[in-house]
Image (cartoon, rainbow, N blue to C red):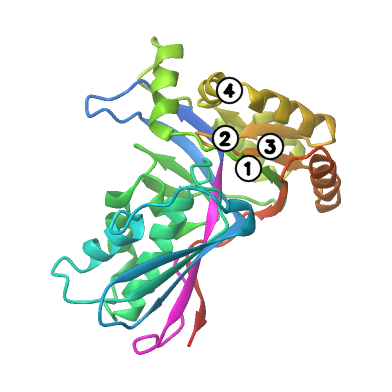
Amino acid sequence: MIRALEDTRSGALTVRAAAKINLHLGVGAPREDGFHPLDTVYHAVSLYDDVSVAPAQEWTVETALAAYLEGVELPGPGENIVDAVGRLLDPTGDRAAAVRIGKSIPVAGGMAGGSADAAAAMVALDRLWDLRTPDDELLRLAAELGSDVPFALLGGTARGQGRGELVTPVADHGDYAWVLVPSERGLSTPEVYRRFDALFPDASPEPPSPTRVLEALSYGDAGRLAIALRNDLEPAALDLRPDLVGVLERGEAEGALRGIVSGSGPTCAFLCESHESAQTVADAMTGAGQLALLALGPVAGAHVVEVL
């Protein structure tokens, strides 16, 4: 699940974690605890955040943004999800680290960038501090941080149930090419869920099953998968952001097999027939004034990429 090198106890290291797309996002009516039951299929794609940690006398977190993220609002001191990871792994506060987050995943974009940061920080700090936490315990702790964090540890393609935190790998025999179109303005996940509740007051307490997506994945066929893609939050996201309708229509008109809002949005994800087709779609979207990022999936979960 989590790949690491043998000895990172004394030096700095960098851990990479991937963005996700929900190939299927079935949403049920809110439970008594306020969470919506989900039945989803997560898919990790090759857009990454890197979390670097180094020994230090005091806890610090800094963030470096990719050029296309410049200007986004960042959490204040002590409010980053990585700060929460530090407190979770070291409740006594006896340990410290200098943490640097290199962000390329859109912020508030429906691609679980914060969850990727949390997963990468968990692996990095566990190695830096030589905690040697078993994988199943890391997954349990990850679920305390957020519904998407366990999948960010796992990567690949997996089914998520409960509120998304109960993850099980699924058979995926494909290699898929995506074009990702972020938005300059993010969407609040709680706001999207509130709009979902308003639009679908009679939603079933049981979320729809991902049967069609799982079947498509078993064939590894992009065309089958395109037909099966489903996101129950998409109507709510489009209701809040009608401009996204035009983005989805343009991507499909330029040759994508299917466009879908990623998670709670506003990033739009376009599944393409091939890498060459994805490049054509990306070029066309760029020519139309959209930022378009190429990505492949599935890719690995949080893993060490550098040890100093």
Residue placed under numbered mark 2 in the picture: 266
- Whichever of callouts 2 and 4 sits on the residue coming sooner in the sequence is 4
- Whichever of callouts 2 and 1 sits on the residue coming sooner in the sequence is 1
Find out whether the residues at labels 2 and 1 contact each other: C-beta distance under 8 Å: yes
Residue placed under numbered mark 4 in the picture: 238
- Res 90 quadrant in image: bottom left
- Start and end of the magenta stretch? 1-21
Foreground pick, 174 / 249: 249
- Image position of 80 with respect to 200: above or below: below
Q: Label 4 crowding class (10 Å Cα cut-off): few <14, some 14-19, many 20+?
A: some
Find out whether the residues at labels 2 and 3 contact each other: C-beta distance under 8 Å: no
- Whichever of callouts 3 and 1 sits on the residue coming sooner in the sequence is 1
Q: Is residue 252 visible?
A: yes
Q: Is residue 200 visible?
A: no
Q: Give the spatial CA distance, label 2 vs label 3.
A: 21 Å
Foreground pick, 91 / 290: 290
Q: Give the spatial CA distance, label 3 vs label 4.
A: 22 Å
Q: In the picture, which quadrant includes the N terminus?
A: bottom left
In-image side of 300 versus 30 (left or right): right
Residue placed under numbered mark 3 in the picture: 225
- Res 11 quadrant in image: bottom left
- Whichever of callouts 2 and 3 sits on the residue coming sooner in the sequence is 3
Residue placed under numbered mark 1 in the picture: 182
**Secondary structure type for disc 3:** helix
- Whichever of callouts 3 and 4 sits on the residue coming sooner in the sequence is 3
Q: Nearer the viewer, mark 3 or mark 4?
A: 4
Q: In the rendered structure, which amino acid carries the disc numbered 4?
A: Leu
Q: Give the spatial CA distance, label 3 vs label 1.
A: 22 Å
Residue positioned 38% across, 71% down in the render: 99
